[in-house]
Image (cartoon, rainbow, N blue to C red):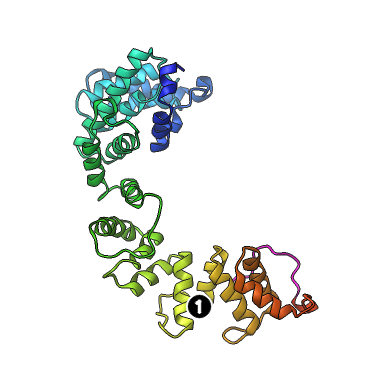
Amino acid sequence: MHFYTLSLKPWYRLIGAASLLLLAFNACATQADNQNDQGMAVYKALLPKGEAGDPEVQTTLGLMRLRGDTVPRDLRIARVWLGKAALQNHTPAQYYLGQLLLLDVFNAKPADLNMQLTEGLGWLRRASRDQHAQSQFLYAQTLLGSQLDNPFGHSKIEAQQHLDSCAEVHLPCTRYALSRLDQGEEEAYCPNSDACEQKRRLLYTLANAEDANARYRLSKFEGEDRMFWLRRAARLAHPQASYELADLVLRNEAPLQPEDPAVLSLLNSAAQQEVLDAMHLLGSLLVEGNRFPVNKPLGIQWLSLSAEKGFEPSRQMLAQIQGPDGNKPVTERVESAHTPENKP
């Protein structure tokens, strides 16, 4: 790879992370292992339509050459077929061609590589302007993740506009847009503000797609029905939502609804996902037997697990159970501190 390419290494890491299709561009794949007679027959049968100018067939031919799973891989031929379709405003072809050009797979010279990258982004922008969601996602992620002010002459403002557009319909865009607003940290409470309103819209989209964490996060927004979102998240086994709902029920601050899991199931789900509060609460309830049937060995095991992870209330309770000599009764000993397999 050229030195110029190495200087853009973060750029290529971003491109590689942005699209699953790029994982298929494995230059080490063996063509002989990938081709078969049936695939070549299909390829030859499609050639007349491709040569006649059918953009969908041209895209298919390009992808067959690009992937190399049914015919020998040839990225240069793939580029030609995809280019023919892209010139006819076929947005899928523009999307695939844009990705292909963003990779240094043609061993281009530094000056040519600059033009190749510019062309690749240009195709992605054209497809993005036609509301092709996958192109919008890749185009936005590429530009907004770059440290350059105007990467290869492209505007980050336009990239943000494409991201905002596809965030309403394409979940990868929604998640990426939300991650940019979060800046690596999810708030414990979100008051009424412009930033929270932007997040709220994105979280609604994810919540409607049965994203448990989005539902839980909405329970922390000012003006939202906390219990509504908490229940919906717990029904999808969200760990913290499961613990909080169980805790509210045990403190008689909320009743269970018919669709809700049982309290023991809620606590067990949260404890299995290593919510320390849930591990401690479940352990103490099993030891004391004032809400569930007594199961001291299992309760002590949960307390031991949370204590090992530094949860001080569990350490204190274990000390009380074990007594001043630090020895548990034989009937309460557990053989290991692995996560209990017992489930309700």
**Is residue 82 at least partly visible in the picture?**
no
Q: Secondary structure at mark 1?
A: helix
Q: Quadrant of residue 319?
A: bottom right
x and y percentages locating residue 71 in the rendered image = 44, 22
| Residue 344: percent from left, percent from top | 58, 74
Is residue 334 magenta-colored?
yes
Badge 1 local density, few (<14 within 10 Å), some, or many (20+)?
Answer: many
Residue at the disc numbered 1: 263
Q: Quadrant of residue 238?
A: bottom left
| Position of residue 76 measured from the top left corner of the image (x, y, whole percent) | 37, 16
Residue drawn where x is 44% and y is 25% of the image: 68
For the record, the magenta segment spans 333-344
- Above or below for 213 versus 99: below
| Residue 26: % across, % down | 48, 26
**Residue at point 46%, 27% (across, down):** 69
Above or below 196: residue 102? above
Residue at left 35%, top 33%? 147
Answer with the quarter of the image where residue 60 lies. Answer: top left
The residue type indicated by label 1 comes to Val
175 in magenta? no
| 216 shown above or below 123 | below
Q: Is residue 140 above or below residue 26?
A: below
Q: Nearer the viewer, residue 220 or 232?
A: 220
Task: Name the main secondary structure of what is drawn in magenta.
Answer: loop
Number of numbered discs visible in the structure rendering: 1
Residue 20 located left or right of residue 144: right
